[in-house]
Image (cartoon, grey):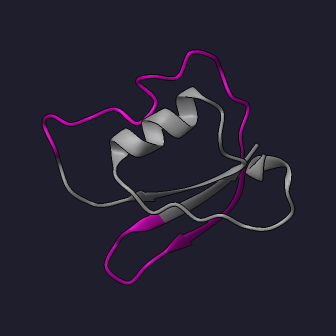
């Protein structure tokens, strides 16, 4: 199983792909990028999560365009 092997697998994808990864607990770390825009509707990243995850904010970065990057680990 890839999850048990040493190394990094990076998945840059849309919300639906990440919903499946979260639903099936197929991640160790998570970068969230918060963009400074107002959206009245949208997809919820953790909508399919069927259990709680304890995650720790490991680091954060504010980019020059106002985007906030939050790096969480389990």
Which quadrant of the structure image shows residue 10? bottom right
Question: Residue at horizontal 35%, vertical 39%?
Answer: 16
Point out residue 63 in the picture as x, y percentages from the top left corner: 43, 79
Which quadrant of the structure image shows residue 21? top right
Q: Is 59 contained in the magenta span?
A: yes
Segment colored magenta: 39-68
Judged from this view, the residue extending furthest toward the top is 50
Q: Is residue 49 above or below residue 14?
A: above
Q: Is residue 4 above or below residue 52?
A: below
Point out residue 68 in the picture as x, y percentages from the top left corner: 45, 65
Foreground residue, 16 or 47?
A: 16
Point out residue 32 in the picture as x, y percentages from the top left corner: 49, 55
Foreground residue, 63 or 71?
A: 71
Foreground residue, 57 or 5?
A: 5
**Apparent side of residue 74 relative to residue 5 in the rendered image (left or right):** left
**Apparent side of residue 48 relative to residue 29 in the rendered image (left or right):** left
Point out residue 42 in the picture as x, y percentages from the top left corner: 20, 37
Judged from this view, the residue extending furthest toward the left is 40
Q: Count every numbered label the image shows and give the total.
A: 0
Question: Residue at horizontal 40%, vertical 24%?
Answer: 47
Judged from this view, the residue extending furthest toward the bottom is 64
Q: Is 32 contained in the magenta span?
A: no
Question: Residue at horizontal 41%, vertical 44%?
Answer: 17
Secondary structure mostly seen in magenta is: loop
Question: Residue at horizontal 56%, vertical 34%?
Answer: 22
Q: Quadrant of the C terminus?
A: top right
Which quadrant of the structure image shows residue 55? top right
**Apparent side of residue 26 relative to residue 3 in the rendered image (left or right):** left
């Amino acid at each position: 199983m890839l999850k048990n092997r040493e190394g990094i697998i990076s998945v840059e994808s849309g919300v639906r792909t990440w919903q499946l990864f979260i639903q099936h607990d197929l991640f160790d770390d998570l970068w969230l990028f918060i963009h400074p825009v107002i959206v009245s509707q949208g997809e919820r990243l953790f909508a399919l999560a069927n259990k709680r995850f304890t995650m720790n904010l490991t680091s954060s970065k504010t980019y020059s365009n106002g985007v906030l990057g939050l790096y969480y680990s389990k």
